[in-house]
Amino acid sequence: MNVVKLIDKKRSGKALNKQELTYLVDGFVAGEIPDYQMSAFLMAVTINGFSDREVIAFTDVLVKSGKQLSFDEKMVDKHSTGGVGDKTTLIIAPIVAALGMKMVKMSGRGLGHTGGTVDKLMAIQNMQLNLPEDKIKKSISEIGVCLLQQSAEIAPADKMLYQLRDVTATTESIPLIASSIMCKKIASGAKIIVIDIKVGKGAFLKTQKEGRALAQLLQKIAKRYHIKLTCVLSRMDEPLGINIGNGLEVMESLSFLNGDYDDKLYDLVVALSSHLLVDYQNISHLEAQEQVKEVISNKEALNAFFAIIENQEGRIKKVKISRKNMVVKSVKSGYIKKIDALQMGQLVQQLGAGRLKANDKIDLGVGVVLLKKSGDYVKEGETLLKVYYGKNKISNSEFLKCYHFANNKTQPPKSIIAII
């Protein structure tokens, strides 16, 4: 086969068969197809899309590019399409363990202005995220949950493509998002999955229409592999929770499980966890919600959090947080109408918490803590947020641009839009 002809075929809007997709992916993994040609192919897919048959075939190729795990236990998994301040995996994983479910959570690095779960976990000193299969299975047996970085063994093609998409403006392709999400879940043996599809200004998908299109495509892939899948559409116009930044989000997750949480984050966590439990135990959604809330309130999930981190040699008392910090004060009085998630995410990325290039080294200790939320009344001179910075420092005026004020209090919309 000829790589250039295949790129041209997709650029022209024509469909590729599984043999052609296998040739492209396997060649890229083997180093026979260079980054610049694979980037051109990814851009062609981003522009022209995949047919349903193509995306299922492409997902299968990614799955078979590496090892596939199998377990005797029924495995669950969750995924978020990425947002600003989205630390739900860090909270849901211990809830899953506390409820007796089993999960191998394979996560990636941050994409663009959105944070990645692996980056957050790396902020915990000595946290081991690359484990051999025997250690993974032992963790599942003893703890119930294992948190992993995508390895060179499991869906390695997706890991390489993931890094390339981050720096080639191809992160927003719905078919590429769908195949990337599902290949990791399939390869890690998941049979029950919940996916949080973020839509809004701070998400890769800007509209509900795009979110629903992704949900429908994910359902088609799940059906092909006999997987029970629930998609939750949630808003990402504003940051999720209070802390934004890798180490800071670990600390917020700890606070959440200790009973100090943001209401919107709580609602989303309960919804996502409950849908996993419904299919796992075959119970009503109301029963599932009650069980989820119980393990949060009685601190069983908090204890599971400590057990997961300790099992993977992490030191939760040593989380990277920058020592340099400053506060940003309001220059006006009024009610906060909205905090722009995209602008805030981009500023945190500029502080060093995110990547501009695939090989960028990020600062795990930088970020912001929002001391005032939407709906709060603030006076001129009152502190809005605290900024933790390292080598890069950003002016107060840039952070103030993220805030939109109103004379009267408005009720922010609920975070959950729909269940699909």
Image (cartoon, rainbow, N blue to C red):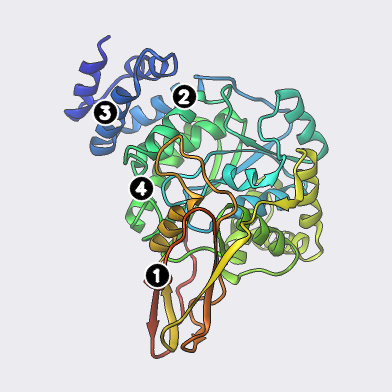
Marks 1, 2: nearer the viewer: 1
Cα gap from disc 4 to disc 2, whole angstroms: 24 Å
Q: Say what secondary structure mark 1 lies in.
A: loop
The disc at residue 213 is 4
Query: Could you tell me the amino acid type at mark 4?
Result: Ala
Marks 4, 1: nearer the viewer: 1
Q: Which of marks 3 and 2 is nearer the N terminus?
A: 3
Residue annotated with mark 3:
40
Near-viewer residue (124 or 4)? 124
Query: Could you tell me the amino acid type at mark 2?
Result: Ala
Mark 4–mark 1 CB contact (< 8 Å): no
Residue 278 in sight:
no
Q: Which residue appears at 64% of the width and 54% of the height?
A: 273
Near-viewer residue (321 or 13)? 321
Residue 223, how many percent across, how many down? 48, 35
Horizontal side of residue 130 vs 349, given as left or right: right
Marks 4, 3: nearer the viewer: 3
Residue annotated with mark 1:
402
Quick check: 23 above or below 58? above
Is the N terminus in the top left, top right, bottom left or bottom right quadrant? Answer: top left
Near-viewer residue (86 or 343)? 343
Q: Earlier in the sequence, mark 4 or mark 3?
A: 3
Residue annotated with mark 2:
157
Query: Could you tell me the amino acid type at mark 3?
Result: Ala
Query: Could you tell me the amino acid type at mark 1?
Result: Cys
Near-viewer residue (405 or 137)? 405
Q: Earlier in the sequence, mark 4 or mark 2?
A: 2
Residue 13 in sight:
yes
Q: Which residue appears at 80% of the width and 34% of the height?
A: 141
Q: Quadrant of residue 202?
A: bottom left
Mark 3–mark 2 CB contact (< 8 Å): no
